[in-house]
Image (cartoon, rainbow, N blue to C red):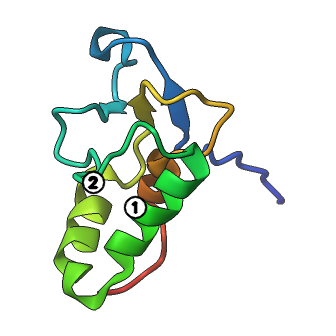
């Protein structure tokens, strides 16, 4: 018997406030642990995303990557970032749901 099971991958949600975050999703905002420390509102969204990706790719950040996977794996992530533009949240989703092994 063949069964087709649809698996919903965690996704990025765009909200205006933390209060709009759906149940079970994690809100990432300026006061959250995962907000980029080097956040520069004047940079382009794509540049900000790649800067964040590079900051987490260095070997000394392996503990941070494990924390991201532990805390965010399988969860939708809500932020105020527009959903039609690249965002650092994309990086969090990639790391959280990767098969990467520490």
Whichever of labels 1 and 2 marks the residue nearer the N terminus, that label is 2
Q: Nearer the viewer, mark 1 or mark 2?
A: 2
Q: Nearer the viewer, residue 5 or 18?
A: 18
> In which image quadrant can residue 32 be found?
top left
**Residue 89 screen position, x and y as percent:** 45, 46
- Name the quarter where the N terminus is drawn: bottom right
Left or right of 75, for residue 11: right
Q: Quick check: 37 above or below 50?
A: above
| Residue farthest front in this picture | 42
- Name the quarter where the C terminus is drawn: bottom left
Q: Quick check: 96 above or below 98?
A: above
Q: Badge 2: few (under 14), some or many (20 or more) residues near its Cα, within 10 Å?
A: few
Query: Residue 52 shows which numbered tag?
Result: 1
| Residue farthest right in this picture | 2
Can you see residue 94?
Answer: no
Q: Quick check: 31 above or below 43?
A: above
> In which image quadrant can residue 85 be found?
top right
Element type at mark 2: loop
State the residue position of label 2: 38
């Amino acid at each position: 018997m063949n069964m087709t099971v649809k698996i919903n991958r965690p996704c990025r949600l765009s909200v205006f406030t933390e209060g709009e975050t759906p149940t079970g999703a994690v809100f990432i905002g300026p006061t959250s642990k995962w907000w980029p420390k080097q956040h520069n509102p004047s940079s382009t969204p794509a540049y900000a995303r790649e800067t964040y990706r590079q900051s987490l790719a260095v070997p000394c950040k392996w503990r941070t990557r494990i924390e991201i996977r532990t805390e965010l794996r399988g969860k939708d992530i809500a932020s105020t970032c527009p959903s039609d533009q690249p965002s650092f949240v994309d990086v969090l989703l990639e790391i959280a749901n990767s098969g990467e092994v520490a």
